[in-house]
Image (cartoon, helix red, strand yellow):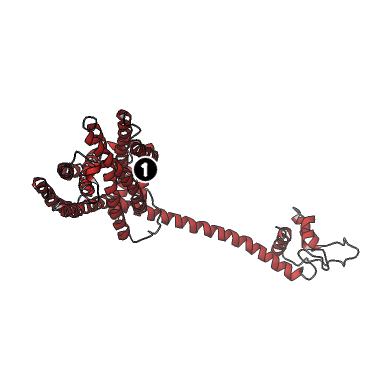
Amino acid sequence: MKMINSLLISLQTNIPTPVPKDLPLPLPLPEWLLIIILVISFLAHLVFVNLMLGGTLLTLWSQIKGLKDKKYDLLAKEIASTITVNKSIAVVLGVAPLLSINVLYTVYFYSANALTGLAWIAVIPLVTIAFLLTYLHKYTWKVFENNKAVHISILALATVILLFIPFIFLTNINLMMFPEKWAVVKGFFNAMMLPNVFPRYFHFLFASLAVTGLFLFWYMSRKNYEFENLLPGFTRYDIQRKGYSLALIASICQMLIGPIVLLTLPTKGMGWNLILVIFTGVAMALPAMWMMWKGLQASRENIGKNFYKVVILMSITVVFMGSGRQIYRANALEPHQKLVKLRTEEFQKIKKEAFVKSRRAQAAENSADLSLADKGKKVFNQNCAACHKPKEMLVGPPVTEMAAIYKDKKTDLINWIKKPGKKRPNAPQMPGFPKISDEDMSTLTEYILTINN
């Protein structure tokens, strides 16, 4: 505790690292379960984001190539038909990880949101525009049959936007892990220049191409896929080789970028648990890449022999890499989370003390007021209640009438009670009460004058 206190003081005085207080609300589910939901749902979402982006890039490449070779234009059309479906699934599957990360890392996620500012707010309109452009491109294939430049431009604009949106997400998620940067980061473009952002982004792009390569291998190898009618000029073997080649080359590029990603990550999040998970993921990917290479060397009949083994191994790799991402996040944020917890506990203690002090003061004030009223009422019941009621005529007039007559004239009321006169000929003479003590007289008249309040 002393070490944390000294670190907190150091952070507050020497290093501009914000240590905010949190809202100590209970989690809706156990933390371990929320972490599992976050990792699994994020990976499921990411696969379809990969397919959407990879499919868009391949469609654009194929359509440009199709300007000279018609069969590639047909290939572009077939790939484009998958983009909007994968896009819709990606959006739906994105809800769970977004909610999970909001719950688990509220302070960090929203701080990063605020610091990336307009870029983060722009995600929704950018996604909307990009999706509309992909639909426009998909359903205007015949309309722009003779004006390919316009048609390709629509897809090119959608591609640029779809390339930029993950950049915003990645910059935001990256920034949330480094509270020590919050005080110096000034907007999205400044956060974008943090050392780890670009390596992670290119690692993501190659992942998109690798996943899309495997997807196209499967999608166009299905027995019920009317390949000969939809893609004349190609054979299934051609597409399978292209899919495997793309997946293999992109995976190799990921392997090369991976060490750069690790080296550009601040060491504060490193740990043996992270290294073990990452290298286990790599160990799963290597035989998958070897099988893809052997498939490319195999005959037409045997190219897909190990396809499902490749998919399983690569899926395991993705799970390990996603788990590694979560492990690094947990390692990196743990020291700061301890400081936030300490700050929150201190704030709650101060708040509780202030609340108790306020309640005590209020209770004392109320007690004083109530005591005065009780004393006055007790004196009234002992000496006056036989002839006077608060609001009704009894032997003498109601107390409310006294209060109205002697409003702001407490001394006159005291004198009247001590030596009363006779104001009503049809009412008996009120006796005097000279023996009531000055303190009791004060509380009695206070009660009489405030009985209407």
Kindly give the residue lying farthest to the front in the view shown.
229
Q: Quadrant of the N terminus?
A: bottom left
Q: Determine which residue is flagged by label 1.
A: 113
Viewer-side residue, 355 vs 446: 355
Above or below, comparing residue 324 to residue 15 in the picture = below
Circle 1 residues within 10 Å: few <14, some 14–19, many ≥20: many
Viewer-side residue, 88 vs 272: 88
Viewer-side residue, 413 vs 10: 10
Q: Position of residue 107 (x, y in %)?
A: 36, 49
Q: Position of residue 11 (x, y in %)?
A: 31, 45
Q: Quadrant of the C terminus?
A: bottom right
Label 1: state its secondary structure.
helix
- Residue at 76%, 54% (x, y): give it: 407
Please give the count of numbered marks on the rendered protein.
Answer: 1
Q: Position of residue 448 (x, y in %)?
A: 74, 61
Is any atom of residue 336 visible in this view? yes
Horizontally, is 317 left or right of 334 in the view?
Answer: left
Quarter-wise, where is residue 72 in the image? top left
Horizontally, is 444 left or right of 120 in the view?
Answer: right
Q: Position of residue 157 (x, y in %)?
A: 32, 33
- Residue at 60%, 60% (x, y): give it: 366
Kindly give the residue lying farthest to the right in the view shown.
425
Horizontally, is 317 left or right of 191 in the view?
Answer: left
